[in-house]
Image: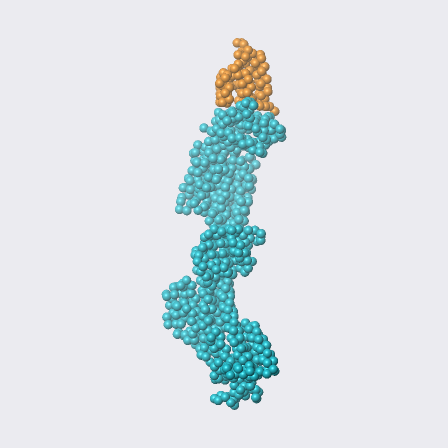
Amino acid sequence: MSTPLSLGTTRGDDGRVVLTAAGEIDLSNIGVFSHALGTATAEADPAQLVVDLTAIEYLDSAAINALYGLASHIHLIVNPALMRSLRISGLAEIISIEPVATEAQ
Amino acid sequence: MDDGRSESAFTWLGRNELMAARDQMERLVRAIVEIGSDLDFDMTLHRIVTAAIELAGGRYGTLGIRGADGALTSFVNVGLDDDTARLFDALSVGEGLRVDDLSALPGWPYADEQPIRALLGVPIVVRGADFGTVFVTDDRPGRVFSDAQEGAVRALATAAAAAIDNARLFERERESTKWTTASREITTALLSGDPQTGPLQLIVNRALELAGAEQAILLVPREPDLPADEVDTLVVAATAGRYTSQVIGQRVPMDGSTTGSVARSGLPLITDSFQYPIEGFTDVGERSAIVIPLVADGTVLGVIAVARQPQQAPFGTNYLDLVSDFARHAAIALALAAGREHALNQQLAQADTVDDALHAAAEELRRLWRARRVMTVTFGRSVDATPQVFSVGEPANWVDLPTNTRQMLSEMRDGDLLTASTAQPGTAAIALRHPEGVLVVWIETAEQRPFTLEDQTLLTVLAGRLGQGLQRVHQVDQQRETALALQHAILGPAQLPGGFAARYQAASRPLEVGGDWYDVVDLEDGRIALIVGDCVGHGLVAATVMGQVRSACRALLFGNPSPGAALAGMDRFAERLPNAFCTTVVCAVLNPDTGELVYSSAGHPPPILVHADGTTELLEGGHTIALGVRPNWSRPEAHTVIPARATLLLYTDGLVERRRAALDAGISRAAAVVQDGRTSTLDELANQIMSNLAPSDGYQDDVVILLYRHPGPLQLTFPADLSQLAPTRGALRSWLARANVPKDVSVDVLIAVGEAVANAIEHGHRNTPDGVISMDATATGDRLRVTITDTGEWKTPQPEVNSTRGRGVALMRGLMHDVTIDPGSAGTTAQLTARIS
């Protein structure tokens, strides 16, 4: 059983591709996330890719590693609770990360 | 013998006479060997007379023994009677006397009465003193003694003197041994405390028997325990032999009485006249008596007077030494037996263990004899085991002892118990029974002073006491161990659920178990009951009652999980069960998910609740009287909620009760220790409570504590598989919520623990897919600890080699306050600590 994770890709009017993920990302489902990330990268102009992880409650270093691969190209939106680990991992220093609180928080 | 006779004995000898002389010489040698062959005094004297008759070829003989006045007073006769023998006292024997016809002797007044004709008298001189004369006589007409016969008897007399001396020495030695043995017997008998015969009676009986006397009396001061100079009257307290009923209870003043002056001077004497009359003793005829003081440590314990029959020989002065020794022994034994508490007894009474007793005794013996060293050597039942040596003064151990000392000690082990040995100068040793074998006590005195008979008696007495003391301590020790084992077996569950810690400590002096107990019971509805109680009393009885009360409480709670109802049920139980009366108990039922607590207390001190922030409260609600005091007493309940990371302490009064201090002060002290330790683990806190609150001389009563911290730990065990990541994370998340961990800390902990678990799965069990991982999370007042243990090898990843996992470990370290990874041989343990607040 893999950790539940739902993914969706939308293309905005401005041409930006938005990859939205909800649930949790860990070593058990990192493959699914990586695949979706790769597809989205292929579809979009790298500079136009937005990864929206606002509905992700948990991610571990596997997810951070996946994001590192695309680092300079994307704009990341995350739950503020995750900012600490993104900072510690150094990811926050090389990509633009936007903390956005969800309604629940 | 004059020169003329001896000359003729050699010059006139013909051949036959030469032959006869040779035979005579052989007979003489044989006779001398014979008389020297017996050490019995009377037998020796008899042999001398017989040999003299044979050598002289006479018919009759006697050996007259001189008394103190120089007259022949006693006789050993062969063929004569005492009356005839007594006549010879009138003869002037001088250096020797030979008469051919006694009846023709000028001035011999008994010519008509006695048919004796030839007579030979030769003196026997023992150690320069005239012992007596051996006479040989003949009544046959014409029969005379020759020079050769006289010479032979003279030679015999010289040999006889040596034989008599030996026999007399032996006799004295035997007598002395008899008294010494008697002294030892007295000591042993007095100390064994035979209730049949009082100690005074025992002494007087033995004195009578040993002195071969007809009466012995023992006088004691009318008022006991006074110094010798303050005693004014003695009273006859024990008697043996004749005139018992007349003499018992007679009073004698110290002043102007023979017994009184002996008591004062401490010196024995022999007399036949007493200054002060004692009815039934001094008025029954003129008798030789010996009067002996019983004095120990300057205190007059009594006086013994022993009298012989009027016709018996008076006591010789050599008796004084013997009897004095006996009296000294008896006095020491009497003093000890009379319960004049010796320091050793006090030391032994205070000892908790056999070793303690041994050490105390060694110190005491060393002090007593100002010994350079006292060793106690314990030989176990196993012959092969190295004896255990304990030494005071100078250190010692078995292997370093000289071979001859080791040999000597081993021989003591195999020899008679309670028999002092002073074979090596400057030392004394004695063997006694040890609960686990034989103990040899070895004393080395500071100066080479002789170990006197008195010292030996004292050592024997003390060794006897020590043996009894060790046995008693050993028994108490064993009972205590049994009770302690019983206590531990029944006082609480063998394994506590997570989140609890308990301690039990028996009272330290006397180290004894009591009736305290604790219990943690999983109830059917998922709740947990916590019970701490205290049955009255100590020892096995209290422990047994406690076991029954505890079982009753469990059973009642299973039937109805209400603390009030359980205590009401126990009230009824306590009414029926002897010794359960007045048991105090606090019973609480906890919802481990919510921290809700219902509790009721029967006369028990209030539980202490310390919140994570240090706020302290006493759970004083739901409190009423102890169990079994009033029937149908209403048992109230109180409710509270234990907040997250708060610590609850249940305890018995032994923890907080101090002499001369209010109970509240003790409770406050206990609360302060919990408050200080609220950030410690529960086990650490339990140890802190027990040690910080212990009085300097140990707990005076037994103590139970039971600790709970909410929530209990999260304990998970799961297969090393990636599919386990989400569910374990879920379980940890909800536990963190119960522990009221702030959201941001919670996320950090989840990620760090996730990394650790992923590491364990991915690397620890790459080659062992059946691996198991366990996780244990606990909360203290201000921090969280999560331990992840796997059964594999968790190679610490190198970031440059494997950047993926290296980043995970870095993340873990970054998020947590502290991370330790211990790659043990059986598996890897990662411990993560996070601060809360």
Q: Colour of chain B?
A: cyan
| Image coordinates for residue B641, horizontal then vertical, percent | 48, 33
Q: Is residue B233 above or below residue B538?
A: below
Query: Which of the 4 image quadrants contains residue B368?
Result: bottom left
Q: Is residue B369 above or below residue B110?
A: above
Tell me what residue is drawn at x 42 percent, y 42 percent. Answer: B666
Q: Quadrant of the C terminus of chain B?
A: top left
Tell me what residue is drawn at x 55 percent, y 45 percent. Answer: B489
| Image coordinates for residue B760, horizontal then vertical, percent | 57, 28
Q: Is residue A72 above or below residue B235?
A: above
Count of labels in the image: 0
Query: Which of the 4 image quadrants contains residue B295?
Result: bottom left
**Residue that sits furthest to the front in the current view:** B11
Question: Is residue B312 visible to us here?
Answer: no
| Image coordinates for residue B6, horizontal then vertical, percent | 53, 81
Frontmost residue, A66 versus B648? A66
Q: Is residue B734 above or below residue B165?
A: above
Question: Is residue B612 visible to us here?
Answer: yes
Frontmost residue, B268 versus B110? B110
Tell me what residue is drawn at x 49 percent, y 63 percent. Answer: B187
Tell me what residue is drawn at x 57 percent, y 32 percent. Answer: B827
